[in-house]
Image: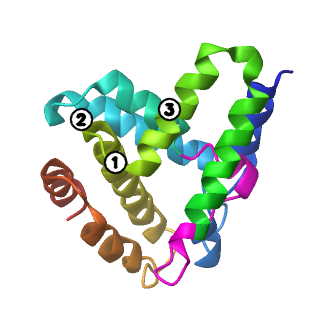
Amino acid sequence: MNSTDCIFSQLKATVRTGWVQHGVPAPESVAEHSWGTAFLCLCYGHEAGIDTSRAVTMALVHDLAEARTGDLAWNPTIDKEKKHERERSAVTGICASLSEQGARAQIIAELTTEYMDAESPEALFVRDMNLIDMVLQAKRYRTVRSGEALSMFHENSRMRLRTNFGTRLFDRLCG
């Protein structure tokens, strides 16, 4: 087993913290969420007018840092700079451990940095699909629970969308 396999396996075993905090039984893993985000990118990238292949690849690695940091759930009181610093450091370490992958490690580093910086159209799109995937998952979990605490995922996500396309899609799928 090489370093890439170990990192991927870690993401499959890392559950999403927000769901745990809200008492969701058997919550999804970070890998499951990354796949859901990537699938949304695949389905809607062309319609959004972005580079779909780049967005799908970015979505697959957007939470790679969590293989080292764990899932640091979004919270309005969290020190964003420290969170981003920890995540950037984790990505740097992960990519260094992937040095045998050569150019692939460089692509992973570039895409995760692009996602974190949120400046390209693809990064903004992936960030929106990340939120939409989370809200769709919250809707699924509401069928398991009463849903009272999970409505916050819907409300907080809607206000964090960054693109017109993301807002329209959110309203269509999650509204």
Tell me where residue 28 appears, x and y as whole percent: 60, 54
Is there any visible trace of residue 73 in the rendered image? no
**Labelled disc at residue 44:** 2
From mark 2 to mark 3, how far is it between C-alphas? Answer: 22 Å
Question: Which range of residues does the magenta coloring cover?
Answer: 63-81
Residue 84 left/right relative to 44: right
The furthest residue to the right? 1
**Disc 1 element:** helix
The number of callouts visible is 3
- Is disc 2 in contact with disc 1, using a CB cutoff of under 8 Å? yes
**Disc 2 element:** helix
Q: Amino acid at mark 3?
A: Glu
Residue 47 left/right relative to 155: left
Q: Amino acid at mark 2?
A: Tyr
Q: Which residue is mark 1?
A: 129
Residue 81 left/right relative to 1: left
Classify 10 Å Cα crowding around label 3: few (below 14), some (14-19), many (20 and above).
some
Q: Which residue is mark 3?
A: 110
From mark 3 to mark 1, how far is it between C-alphas? Answer: 19 Å
Asked if 153 appears above or below 96 in the picture, the reply is below
